[in-house]
Amino acid sequence: MEQELNELYSPVILDHNQYPRHYQKRPEAGLILDAYNSLCGDKFKLYLDVQEDKVVEASFSGYGCAVSKAATSVLMEKIQGKSLEEVRNLVEGYFKVTKTDEELTTDEELLAFAAAKKFPGRLKCAVLSWEVLAEYLEEKI
Protein backbone atom coordinates (compact mmCIF):
# COMPACT_ATOMS: atom_id res chain seq x y z
CA MET A 1 0.00 0.00 0.00
CA GLU A 2 2.84 2.41 0.81
CA GLN A 3 4.38 1.91 -2.63
CA GLU A 4 1.02 2.63 -4.28
CA LEU A 5 0.72 5.85 -2.26
CA ASN A 6 4.22 6.84 -3.35
CA GLU A 7 3.14 6.27 -6.95
CA LEU A 8 0.05 8.42 -6.45
CA TYR A 9 2.00 11.25 -4.85
CA SER A 10 4.75 11.24 -7.45
CA PRO A 11 7.27 14.07 -7.80
CA VAL A 12 5.24 15.43 -10.74
CA ILE A 13 2.07 15.68 -8.65
CA LEU A 14 3.86 17.13 -5.65
CA ASP A 15 5.61 19.73 -7.81
CA HIS A 16 2.43 20.85 -9.60
CA ASN A 17 0.62 21.01 -6.27
CA GLN A 18 3.28 23.14 -4.62
CA TYR A 19 4.02 25.28 -7.69
CA PRO A 20 0.86 25.26 -9.81
CA ARG A 21 1.25 26.54 -13.35
CA HIS A 22 -1.11 29.21 -14.68
CA TYR A 23 -2.71 29.71 -11.25
CA GLN A 24 -4.41 33.05 -11.71
CA LYS A 25 -7.93 34.44 -11.37
CA ARG A 26 -9.07 36.02 -14.60
CA PRO A 27 -12.71 37.07 -14.26
CA GLU A 28 -12.45 38.85 -17.62
CA ALA A 29 -11.77 35.55 -19.45
CA GLY A 30 -14.07 34.75 -22.34
CA LEU A 31 -15.08 31.44 -20.82
CA ILE A 32 -15.21 30.40 -17.17
CA LEU A 33 -15.90 26.78 -16.28
CA ASP A 34 -16.65 25.54 -12.77
CA ALA A 35 -15.21 22.25 -11.53
CA TYR A 36 -16.63 21.05 -8.22
CA ASN A 37 -16.37 17.71 -6.45
CA SER A 38 -19.19 17.54 -3.92
CA LEU A 39 -17.68 14.43 -2.30
CA CYS A 40 -14.50 16.10 -1.11
CA GLY A 41 -15.04 19.81 -1.68
CA ASP A 42 -12.43 20.39 -4.41
CA LYS A 43 -13.47 23.53 -6.27
CA PHE A 44 -11.78 25.22 -9.22
CA LYS A 45 -12.59 27.81 -11.82
CA LEU A 46 -11.05 27.35 -15.24
CA TYR A 47 -10.50 30.60 -17.15
CA LEU A 48 -10.16 30.17 -20.89
CA ASP A 49 -9.80 32.55 -23.78
CA VAL A 50 -10.57 30.78 -27.04
CA GLN A 51 -10.17 32.54 -30.38
CA GLU A 52 -10.65 30.92 -33.76
CA ASP A 53 -10.96 27.49 -32.09
CA LYS A 54 -7.61 27.90 -30.32
CA VAL A 55 -6.87 28.28 -26.61
CA VAL A 56 -4.92 31.51 -26.46
CA GLU A 57 -4.80 31.67 -22.68
CA ALA A 58 -5.84 29.34 -19.86
CA SER A 59 -5.54 29.65 -16.11
CA PHE A 60 -7.29 28.45 -12.97
CA SER A 61 -8.01 29.34 -9.38
CA GLY A 62 -9.53 27.55 -6.44
CA TYR A 63 -8.62 24.87 -3.98
CA GLY A 64 -8.47 21.14 -3.61
CA CYS A 65 -6.31 18.20 -2.69
CA ALA A 66 -2.84 17.72 -4.13
CA VAL A 67 -4.08 15.39 -6.87
CA SER A 68 -6.87 17.64 -8.15
CA LYS A 69 -4.75 20.79 -7.99
CA ALA A 70 -1.85 19.11 -9.78
CA ALA A 71 -4.14 17.63 -12.43
CA THR A 72 -5.66 21.05 -13.09
CA SER A 73 -2.21 22.63 -13.25
CA VAL A 74 -1.04 20.05 -15.80
CA LEU A 75 -4.22 20.60 -17.82
CA MET A 76 -3.70 24.37 -17.95
CA GLU A 77 -0.07 23.93 -18.92
CA LYS A 78 -0.83 21.43 -21.68
CA ILE A 79 -3.61 23.37 -23.42
CA GLN A 80 -1.84 26.71 -23.86
CA GLY A 81 -1.87 27.62 -27.56
CA LYS A 82 -3.55 24.38 -28.65
CA SER A 83 -6.47 24.06 -31.05
CA LEU A 84 -9.70 22.73 -29.58
CA GLU A 85 -9.18 19.54 -31.59
CA GLU A 86 -5.70 19.12 -30.08
CA VAL A 87 -7.16 19.74 -26.62
CA ARG A 88 -9.87 17.13 -27.25
CA ASN A 89 -7.22 14.58 -28.27
CA LEU A 90 -5.17 15.44 -25.17
CA VAL A 91 -8.20 14.96 -22.91
CA GLU A 92 -9.05 11.63 -24.55
CA GLY A 93 -5.46 10.47 -24.06
CA TYR A 94 -5.52 11.55 -20.41
CA PHE A 95 -8.72 9.59 -19.82
CA LYS A 96 -7.08 6.50 -21.32
CA VAL A 97 -4.22 6.92 -18.84
CA THR A 98 -6.46 7.53 -15.83
CA LYS A 99 -9.55 5.44 -16.57
CA THR A 100 -8.34 2.44 -18.58
CA ASP A 101 -5.34 0.17 -18.83
CA GLU A 102 -4.30 1.91 -22.05
CA GLU A 103 -1.38 4.19 -21.38
CA LEU A 104 -0.58 5.16 -24.94
CA THR A 105 1.65 8.08 -24.11
CA THR A 106 5.18 8.74 -23.01
CA ASP A 107 4.24 12.05 -21.41
CA GLU A 108 5.60 11.85 -17.87
CA GLU A 109 3.16 14.44 -16.54
CA LEU A 110 0.12 12.56 -17.82
CA LEU A 111 1.45 9.17 -16.73
CA ALA A 112 1.89 10.50 -13.18
CA PHE A 113 -1.89 10.30 -12.77
CA ALA A 114 -2.20 6.66 -13.85
CA ALA A 115 -1.82 5.58 -10.21
CA ALA A 116 -5.16 7.26 -9.42
CA LYS A 117 -6.89 4.20 -10.92
CA LYS A 118 -5.84 2.26 -7.82
CA PHE A 119 -7.60 4.77 -5.56
CA PRO A 120 -11.25 5.20 -6.60
CA GLY A 121 -11.65 8.09 -4.15
CA ARG A 122 -8.75 9.91 -5.79
CA LEU A 123 -9.69 9.13 -9.38
CA LYS A 124 -12.44 11.77 -9.28
CA CYS A 125 -9.81 14.25 -8.08
CA ALA A 126 -7.50 13.37 -10.96
CA VAL A 127 -10.18 13.87 -13.62
CA LEU A 128 -12.31 16.66 -12.12
CA SER A 129 -11.15 19.62 -14.22
CA TRP A 130 -10.46 17.42 -17.24
CA GLU A 131 -14.07 16.19 -17.24
CA VAL A 132 -15.43 19.74 -17.05
CA LEU A 133 -13.32 20.71 -20.05
CA ALA A 134 -14.39 17.55 -21.89
CA GLU A 135 -18.06 18.49 -21.39
CA TYR A 136 -17.39 21.92 -22.84
CA LEU A 137 -15.58 20.40 -25.84
CA GLU A 138 -18.46 18.00 -26.51
CA GLU A 139 -20.77 20.98 -26.86
CA LYS A 140 -18.30 23.07 -28.83
CA ILE A 141 -16.81 20.58 -31.30
Image (cartoon, grey):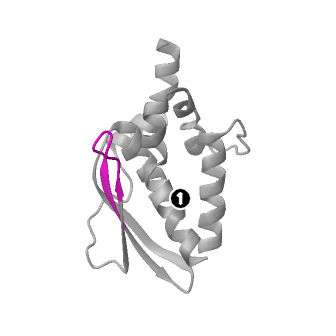
- Residue sitting at x 55%, y 86%: 52
Frontmost residue, 93 versus 11: 93
Q: In this view, does 15 lie above or below 80?
A: above
Q: Is residue 55 left or right of residue 101?
A: left
**Residue 41 counted in the magenta span:** yes
For disc 1, the neighbor class at 10 Å (few under 14, some 14 to 19, many from 20) is: some
- Residue sitting at x 59%, y 41%: 98
Q: In this view, does 94 lie above or below 14?
A: below
User: Percent from the top left, x then y, of residue 115?
Assistant: 55, 30
**Can residue 103 be seen here?**
yes
Q: Is residue 104 left or right of residue 44?
A: right
| Element at label 1 | helix
User: Percent from the top left, x then y, of residue 41?
Assistant: 27, 44
Label 1: which residue?
78
Task: State which region is magenta.
Answer: 35-46
Q: In this view, does 134 lie above or below 20?
A: below
User: Percent from the top left, x then y, of residue 61?
Assistant: 29, 58
Q: In which quarter of the image is residue 40?
A: top left
Q: Which residue extends farthest bottom?
A: 52
* Amino acid at pointer 1: Lys
Frontmost residue, 65 versus 136: 136
Q: Is residue 97 left or right of residue 12?
A: right
**Residue 128 counted in the magenta span:** no
Q: In this view, does 98 lie to the left or right of 33?
A: right
Q: Tell how many labels.
A: 1
Frontmost residue, 96 versus 28: 96
- Residue sitting at x 50%, y 69%: 136
